[in-house]
């Protein structure tokens, strides 16, 4: 019975993937340059990030070529309870490095890449936008906890030009460095 259930789920996933449009990713990502700390500037609020603020993602390249993913955020306010989870990402498309499959403990191991880099500051790797094949998740990331309105608007324009729905984005409060 369990085998049949898995087969049905895989079939439904394959059918739904074939019905969705292909999300266009950036032409190339230099993985070592992409590593490091990123601040979440805005995101679609979904079950796993609901109410989180001060959210960061830290990516570390491992010897085997995979990437350790450490996500952190505080519940409801910057003094709230720290939530963190560590996962692992593998590069799905080695020609572009712009499609990765990220797996976290307790989450299903999906048969497709679920981390698609669709916008990237190719010159300085200072900002990025990431979604999944269904555009259920959408994250705008920055190397600093602040982003100018001009940069944010430019990213929204790029996402909209790609046909990515930005209407569910919520700004993520971040702790700003003390002066």
Image: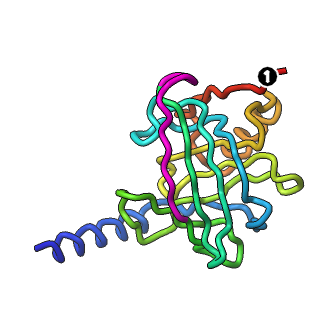
Residue lying farthest left?
1
Q: Foreground residue, 157 or 127?
A: 127
Above or below, comparing residue 26 to residue 156 in the picture? below
The spot of residue 120 in percent (x, y) is 76, 53
Q: Foreground residue, 59 or 22?
A: 59
The spot of residue 130 in percent (x, y) is 62, 51
Q: Is residue 116 left or right of residue 103?
A: right
Q: Residue at x 76, y 31 (%)?
A: 146
Please tell me in which quadrant of the rendered image residue 99 appears: bottom right
What's the magenta region? 76-88
Q: Residue at x 47, y 54 (%)?
A: 134
Q: Is residue 148 left or right of residue 80?
A: right
* Residue located beneath label 1 in the image: 178
Q: Residue at x 52, y 31 (%)?
A: 74
Q: Residues within 10 Å of mark 1 (few under 14, many from 20)?
A: few
Q: Quadrant of the N terminus?
A: bottom left
The spot of residue 85 in percent (x, y) is 48, 50
Membership of 140 in magenta stretch: no
Disc 1 element? loop
Q: Foreground residue, 76 or 44?
A: 76
Please tell me in which quadrant of the rendered image residue 172 appears: top right
Q: Quadrant of the C terminus?
A: top right
Please tell me in which quadrant of the rendered image residue 145 appears: top right
Q: Is residue 102 left or right of residue 17?
A: right
Q: Residue at x 62, y 35 (%)?
A: 42
């Amino acid at each position: 019975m369990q085998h049949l259930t898995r087969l049905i789920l895989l079939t439904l996933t394959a059918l739904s993937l074939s019905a969705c449009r292909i999300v266009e990713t950036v032409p190339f990502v230099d993985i070592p340059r992409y590593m490091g700390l990123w601040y979440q500037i805005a995101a679609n609020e979904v079950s796993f990030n609901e109410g989180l603020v001060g959210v960061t993602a830290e990516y570390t390249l491992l010897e085997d070529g995979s990437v350790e993913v450490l996500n952190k955020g505080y519940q409801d306010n910057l003094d709230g309870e720290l939530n963190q989870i560590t996962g692992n990402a593998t590069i799905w498309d080695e020609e572009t490095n712009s499609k990765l499959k990220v797996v976290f403990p307790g989450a299903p191991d999906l048969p497709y890449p679920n981390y698609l880099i669709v916008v990237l500051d190719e010159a300085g790797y200072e900002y990025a936008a990431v979604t999944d094949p269904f555009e259920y998740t959408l994250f705008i990331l920055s190397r600093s906890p602040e982003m100018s309105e001009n940069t944010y608007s430019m990213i929204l324009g790029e996402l909209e030009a790609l046909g990515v729905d930005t209407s569910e984005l919520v700004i993520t409060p971040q702790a700003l460095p003390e002066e």
